[in-house]
C-alpha cells in the first residue's frame, strides 16, 4: 500500500497499493523472461477437437507442439515436437472457439474455462490467478513475459487478439526454466491466414453491455508469401455493482511473410485503452462486532461516483526465423511493452485494532465502523526483451533427437507518482453507516503528482533443453537454465541495488505402456525472485524448492478423447507470506515461510461422439505452512470445471453448450479477528446458437443460470459475483 498520513493506518485487507503494484509489475515482466521461450505451444488436436467438431483420429496424432509455417500460427517457445499427450506435465488449452461459444471476451472469463485455474477478482480492477494453491507469477504472450507482479493482473485484457490460451500447471522449470509451483499462462496471438477471411460480431446484454468485434485476414501477394491480419474490439457497459461502468477499446495488427528462400519475418502491434468508473479499491467488509456475518445486496459496493482507474497497454513485436538446412532453425525475436495507469481511488476498510476511536468490525445496528482513504496516482512502465534460439535435430543411438539452445536479454523501467488528497476531508477517517450511497462523499482536491519510486531491471539468461529418444517407448527431456537478474532503484527514502543468479536443472521421463497409455514423471527446480518486502522495505530473497509430478495420460474413443491423471508434490521454501502488519513506509510486511502442496488432478478433453465435445477437470489439494492445514484458507481444497458442447445430430445448424465450475468452502479472517466464510457453490453457464445462414450465427448466452449468490473470493477482500445475466450476439463470416 501507499503510505498514508501518520494518523491513518494501512488498510488491513490489501497487499499493496495499485501504483506500487504497477511498479512491481515491471519486475514480473523481466522475471517472466527467465522462462525464456514460453510454453511448448500445445497445438494438440485433443484440445482443438473440442471446438472443431470434425477432427479425425489421425489429426489428433499428427498435430505437433511446434507451429508450422503452413498454418501461420504463433509457436510456443520450447520448440520441441511434442503433442500434449507426450509432454510430461499437465497442460490445458482454452481455444478461440470455446471463448466465442461461452462469451469469454476477457482473459478472466477465458481462464475460468481452464482446468485447475482459480480467478480471484478481489477488486473490480485487480485479479490474481492461481493453480495448485499458489499464485501464477509467470504469464506470457507468445512466450514473452507480461507484467503480472504478485500474480496480479490490472484491468481486463481483451481476448479478441488471441488464438488460444495455454496453461501449464505445476512448476514450470521443466519447460520454461524457472517459476513457482503454480504454473504458467501463455496467450497465443492470432496470425494471418493463408486465405482471405473475416468476421464481424455484435452483442448486447445485461446492464446495457454492448460489444462489437471485427477480424480480417488477407494475403498481400498472389503467391500468399506475405499476409496480414487486423483485429478490433469495442465494449461498453454498466455492471451489477452500483456506479460501476466499464469501456474497452482494443486493436491488434500483424504482418507475416517470407524473406528469401529460408527466412520468415513477422511483426505486430496491439493497443488497449480501458476505462473503469466507480471502481472498488479493496471491497466489502462482512464481519460484525457481535461475530455475525453480514449479507449485503449483490450490488453492494464501497465506491464513490468520482473514482476511476484507466489503463493503456501497448505491445509491439518482431521475430525472424531462418532455416539452416533441413534440421536446424535460428530464431531472433524482439518484444516491447508499455503500460500506463491513471487512478483516483477510494478505500473503505476496517481499521487496524490500534486505530484510536474506532472499532475493528461493523456495528450490526448502526452500520458504523468503516474508515476511508482517498488516493490518486499515475504510473508507467516500459520493457525491452530480446532472445536468440537455435533448435535442431540430430542422430544419436540410431534415433532422432532434438535440442534447443538460447539466450535472452531484457531491460525494464518503471516510474510511479502519487497525488495526495486534501486533508481534512470527509473521505478521511470514519465513514457514514454502510451501505452508504455512492454520492455520499465529494471528490477531494488533489495535489500535484510527486514521484515516489523508480525501478530499473536487467536480466541475462542462458538455457538449453534436449529431448532424447532412449528407446522405442522411453523418452526423456533434460535441461538447465541459468539467469542473472539485477534490480536497482528507490522507493520513498530507501534505495536498493540487488543482483542474484541461479542455475535451475529440470528433467522428465515418459514411457509408452501401449499405443494408448503413457506414463510420465517430472522434476522441476523452483526458483522465483520475489517482489514482496520485509519490515525494512527490503525485497525478500528468492523462493526456492522442488516440484514432482507423476501421471498417466490415456487415449480413448479411437484417440479422440485424452485423459490425464496427475499426482503432484511441491515444497516451496522462503515463500513470501503476509503478516497482516505494515512498515513505516506503508508497505505490507511479508516474511519467508516454507509451504507444502500436495494433490491430485484429473482432466478429460476431447470428443465423446461426432457431435459432442467435453472438457472436465477436478482438483483435490492439501496445503500446509504457517497456519498448518489452514494456510491460504481462501483457496478451495476441492474444485471442478465442466464444458460440454455439441450440435444436434439431425440439424447441425443448431448448437448448444453448458459449462460451469464448482468449488468447496473457503474462509479468511478480517481485521476483526472473525472468519468470513463462503460455503461451497456452483456457477452454471449455457448457450444455444443457430447458424441461420451458412456464414451467420445467432447466439444466446446465459451466465449463472441458477442465480447463485456467492462471494467471489476471500483472498484479500471480496464482493458478490454477477447474478444471472444474458447476452444476445450475432456474427457474420466472410
Image: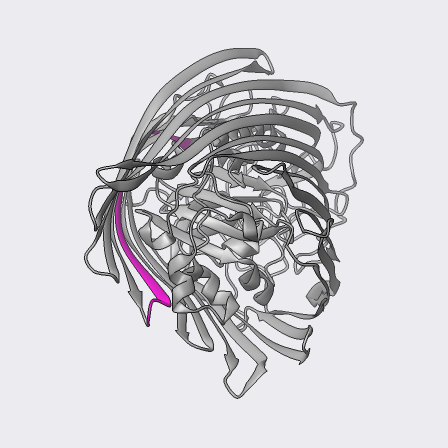
- Quarter containing the C terminus: bottom right
Q: Position of residue 609 (x, y in %)?
A: 41, 77
Q: How many marks?
A: 0
Q: Position of residue 352 (x, y in %)?
A: 50, 33
* Relative depth, front residue between 197 and 384: 197
* Relative depth, front residue between 394 and 704: 394
Residue beneath the point at 50% across and 27% down: 388
Residue beneath the point at 72% across and 26% down: 420
Q: Does the image show residue 721?
A: yes
Residue beneath the point at 52% across and 88% down: 650
Say which quarter of the image contains residue 522: top left
Q: Which residues are magenta?
A: 558-578
Question: Is the residue 425 above or below the residue 410 in the image?
Answer: below
Colour logic: one colour
Q: Is residue 129 magenta?
A: no
* Relative depth, front residue between 83 and 347: 83
The answer to whether residue 552 is left or right of residue 129 is: left
Q: Position of residue 654 (x, y in %)?
A: 59, 81
Q: Does the image show residue 354?
A: no
Q: Position of residue 373 (x, y in %)?
A: 65, 35
- Quarter containing the N terminus: top right
Q: Main secondary structure of the magenta part?
A: strand
* Relative depth, front residue between 675 and 568: 568
Residue situated furthest bottom in the rendering: 650
Question: Is the residue 434 above or below the residue 579 in the image?
Answer: below
Amino acid at each position: 500500500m501507499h503510505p498514508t498520513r501518520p494518523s491513518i493506518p494501512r488498510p488491513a485487507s490489501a497487499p499493496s497499493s495499485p501504483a506500487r503494484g504497477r511498479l512491481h509489475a515491471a519486475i514480473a515482466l523481466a522475471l517472466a523472461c527467465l522462462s525464456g521461450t514460453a510454453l511448448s505451444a500445445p497445438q494438440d488436436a485433443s484440445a482443438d477437437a473440442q471446438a472443431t467438431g470434425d477432427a479425425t483420429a489421425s489429426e489428433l496424432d499428427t498435430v505437433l507442439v511446434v507451429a508450422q509455417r503452413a498454418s501461420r500460427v504463433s509457436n510456443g517457445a520450447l520448440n520441441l515436437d511434442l503433442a500434449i499427450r507426450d509432454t510430461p506435465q499437465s497442460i490445458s488449452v482454452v481455444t478461440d472457439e470455446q471463448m466465442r461459444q461461452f462469451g469469454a471476451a476477457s482473459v478472466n472469463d477465458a481462464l475460468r474455462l481452464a482446468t485447475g485455474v482459480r480467478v480471484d477478482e478481489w477488486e473490480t480492477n485487480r485479479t490474481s490467478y492461481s493453480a495448485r494453491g499458489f499464485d501464477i507469477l509467470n504469464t506470457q504472450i507468445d512466450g514473452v513475459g507480461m507484467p503480472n507482479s504478485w500474480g496480479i493482473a490490472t484491468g481486463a485484457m481483451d481476448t479478441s487478439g488471441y488464438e488460444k490460451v495455454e496453461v501449464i500447471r505445476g512448476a514450470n522449470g521443466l519447460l520454461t526454466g524457472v517459476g513457482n509451483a503454480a504454473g504458467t499462462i501463455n496467450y497465443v496471438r492470432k496470425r494471418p491466414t493463408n486465405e482471405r477471411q473475416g468476421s464481424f460480431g455484435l452483442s448486447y446484454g445485461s446492464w446495457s453491455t454492448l460489444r462489437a468485434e471485427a477480424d480480417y485476414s488477407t494475403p498481400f501477394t498472389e503467391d500468399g508469401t506475405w499476409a496480414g491480419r487486423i483485429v478490433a474490439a469495442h465494449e461498453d457497459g454498466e455492471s451489477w455493482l452500483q456506479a460501476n461502468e466499464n469501456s474497452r477499446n482494443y486493436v491488434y495488427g500483424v504482418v507475416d511473410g517470407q524473406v528469401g528462400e529460408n527466412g520468415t519475418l513477422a511483426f505486430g502491434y496491439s493497443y488497449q485503452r480501458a476505462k473503469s468508473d466507480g471502481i472498488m479499491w479493496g471491497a466489502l467488509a462482512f464481519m460484525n462486532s457481535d461475530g455475525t456475518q453480514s449479507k449485503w445486496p449483490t450490488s453492494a459496493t464501497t465506491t464513490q461516483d468520482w473514482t476511476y482507474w484507466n489503463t493503456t497497454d501497448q505491445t509491439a513485436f518482431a521475430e525472424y526465423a531462418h532455416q539452416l538446412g533441413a534440421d536446424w532453425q535460428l530464431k531472433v525475436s524482439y518484444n516491447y511493452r508499455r503500460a500506463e495507469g491513471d487512478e483516483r481511488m477510494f478505500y473503505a476498510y476496517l481499521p487496524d485494532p490500534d486505530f484510536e476511536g474506532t472499532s475493528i468490525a461493523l456495528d450490526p445496528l448502526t452500520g458504523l465502523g468503516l474508515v476511508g482513504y482517498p488516493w490518486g496516482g499515475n504510473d508507467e512502465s516500459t520493457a525491452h526483451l530480446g532472445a536468440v534460439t537455435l533448435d535442431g535435430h540430430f542422430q544419436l543411438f540410431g534415433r532422432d533427437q532434438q535440442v534447443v539452445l538460447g539466450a535472452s536479454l531484457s531491460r525494464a523501467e518503471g516510474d510511479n507518482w502519487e497525488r495526495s488528497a486534501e486533508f481534512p476531508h470527509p473521505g478521511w477517517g470514519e465513514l457514514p453507516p454502510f451501505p452508504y450511497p455512492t454520492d455520499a462523499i465529494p471528490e477531494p482536491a488533489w495535489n500535484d503528482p510527486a514521484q515516489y519510486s523508480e525501478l530499473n531491471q536487467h536480466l541475462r539468461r542462458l538455457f538449453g533443453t534436449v529431448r532424447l529418444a532412449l528407446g522405442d517407448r522411453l523418452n526423456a527431456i533434460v535441461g538447465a537454465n541459468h539467469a542473472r537478474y539485477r534490480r536497482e532503484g528507490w522507493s520513498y527514502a530507501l534505495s536498493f541495488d540487488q543482483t542474484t543468479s541461479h542455475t535451475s536443472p529440470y528433467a522428465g521421463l515418459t514411457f509408452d505402456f501401449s499405443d494408448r497409455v503413457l506414463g510420465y514423471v517430472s522434476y522441476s527446480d523452483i526458483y522465483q525472485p520475489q517482489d514482496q518486502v520485509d519490515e525494512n522495505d527490503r525485497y525478500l530473497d528468492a523462493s526456492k524448492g522442488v516440484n514432482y509430478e507423476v501421471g498417466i495420460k490415456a487415449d480413448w474413443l479411437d484417440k479422440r478423447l485424452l485423459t490425464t491423471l496427475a499426482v503432484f508434490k511441491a515444497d516451496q521454501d522462503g515463500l513470501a507470506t503476509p503478516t497482516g502488519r505494515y512498515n513505516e513506509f506503508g508497505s505490507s510486511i511479508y516474511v519467508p515461510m516454507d509451504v507444502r502442496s500436495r494433490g491430485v488432478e484429473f482432466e478429460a478433453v476431447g470428443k465423446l461422439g461426432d457431435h459432442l465435445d467435453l472438457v472436465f477437470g477436478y482438483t483435490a489439494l492439501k496445503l500446509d505452512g504457517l497456519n498448518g492445514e489452514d494456510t491460504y484458507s481462501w483457496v478451495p481444497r476441492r474444485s471442478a470445471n465442466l464444458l460440454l458442447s455439441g450440435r444436434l445430430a439431425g440439424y447441425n445448424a443448431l448448437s448448444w453448450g453448458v459449462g460451469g465450475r464448482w468449488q468447496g468452502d473457503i474462509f479468511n479472517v478480517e481485521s476483526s479477528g472473525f472468519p468470513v466464510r463462503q460455503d461451497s457453490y456452483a456457477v452454471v453457464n449455457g448457450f444455444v446458437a443457430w447458424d441461420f445462414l451458412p456464414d451467420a450465427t445467432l447466439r444466446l448466452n446465459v451466465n449463472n443460470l441458477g442465480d447463485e449468490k456467492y462471494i467471489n473470493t476471500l483472498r484479500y477482500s471480496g464482493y458478490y459475483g454477477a447474478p444471472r445475466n444474458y447476452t444476445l450476439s450475432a456474427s457474420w463470416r466472410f
